[in-house]
Amino acid sequence: MSQLLLDTHVFIWFSDDAPNLPTAVREKIESADSVYLSIVSLWEIAIKISIGKLSLQSDYHDIEAGLVNLGIELIPISFADTTRLIDLPLHHRDPFDRLLIVQAIERSLLLVSADEVFDAYPVQLFWQ
């Protein structure tokens, strides 16, 4: 049974049908039993749009309907996620990515990401 947690960039590339998402990654997502997106990714997207560091092909307000259409479930941030952050080594300083790492570990999810810094953590990763 494959249960995936998408990193923010992977979600954007997947939902935009971007050519920089490798075919093997797209196929893995499309054939997964469950695909998840953390609420932290939506937080990151909203912040980056608001400060002009990111633009999407579609309107941000359409993401919620897009998640439903794609069969992607949202994961909230739990208290357990925040307590796990206390002991997580600072190999990666990005707070969004640190939460994704913790959520993948806590829920035994395969984290789909091109971010090589994730290799420093005891998390299951997938990237072509």
Image (cartoon, rainbow, N blue to C red):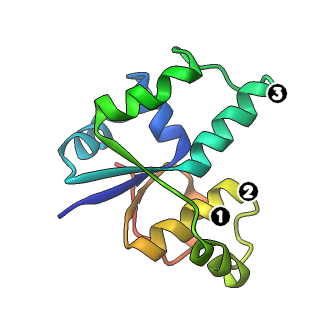
Q: Position of residue 74 (x, y in %)?
A: 44, 49
Q: Position of residue 71 (x, y in %)?
A: 28, 39
Which residue shows up at 72% across the image and 81% down it?
86
Residue type highlighted by circle 2: Asp
Residue 69 location, quadrant: top left
Residue 104 in the image: above or below residue 61: below
Residue 85 in the image: above or below residue 4: below
Mark 1: secondary structure:
helix
Mark 3: secondary structure:
loop
Marking on residue 106 = none
Marking on residue 98 = 1
- N-term-proximal mark, 1 vs 3: 3
Is the residue under label 1 in contact with that under label 2 (CB below 8 Å)?
yes
Which residue shows up at 53% across the image and 14% down it?
57
What's the CA distance linking mark 1 and mark 3?
A: 21 Å
Query: Which of 4/24 is in front?
Result: 4
User: Mark 2 or 3, which is nearer the eye?
Assistant: 3
Label 3 sits on residue: 51
Residue type highlighted by circle 3: Ile
Residue 59 in the image: above or below residue 86: above
- N-term-proximal mark, 2 vs 3: 3
Which residue shows up at 46% across the image and 67% down it?
104
Residue 74 is left or right of residue 47, and the answer is left
Is the residue under label 3 in contact with that under label 2 (CB below 8 Å)?
no
Q: Residue furthest bottom?
A: 87
Residue 119, visible in the rendered structure? no
Label 2 sits on residue: 94
